[in-house]
Amino acid sequence: MSRVKRGTVTKRRHKRLLKQTKGFWDTKKCFKRARETLLRALKFAFIGRKLKKRDLEPYSLQESMQLAKLMRFLIVPLCMHSKG
């Protein structure tokens, strides 16, 4: 039976994770610390996307209301003219 060598897959995974955490504080060499930092960063990124949607919602409602008013002013006169 041949010997199983598993170093390459693990090294590739560690290298990829360390590359993702490039520029983070204190994640240069320690894989465990880098993984924790990356998970925390991804969690904050998810929360940030939800907060951005929540912050932009009133603006989209205002824009849709303005568009509805504009369409009403444009469509109503056209409908009146088409009846007669």
Image: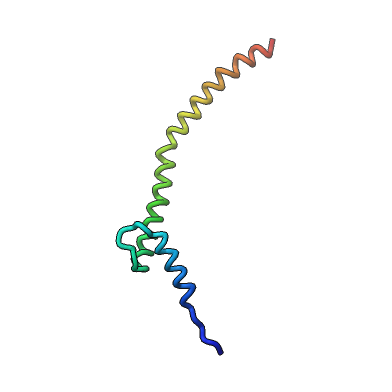
Nearer to me, 75 or 30: 30
Residue at 44%, 72% in the rendered image: 11
User: Residue 80, position in %: x, y?
Assistant: 64, 13
The residue lying toward the viewer, choosing from 39 and 23, is 23
Seen as rendered, the residue at the extreme left is: 26
* Quadrant containing the N terminus in the rendered view: bottom right
Q: Quick one: which residue is furthest to the top in this view?
A: 84
Quadrant of the snapshot with the C terminus:
top right
Residue extending farthest to the bottom is 1
Answer with the quarter of the image where residue 30 lies.
bottom left
The residue depicted at 47 percent of the width and 33 percent of the height is: 60
Give the left or right position of residue 2, taking residue 38 as reference: right
Q: Position of residue 82 (x, y in %)?
A: 68, 14
In this picture, is 18 found above or below 53? below
How many numbered marks, from 0 up?
0
- Residue drawn at x 34%, y 67% is 29
Tell me what residue is drawn at x 42 percent, y 68 percent.
Answer: 14
State the image coordinates of residue 25 (x, y, percent, origin top left): 30, 59
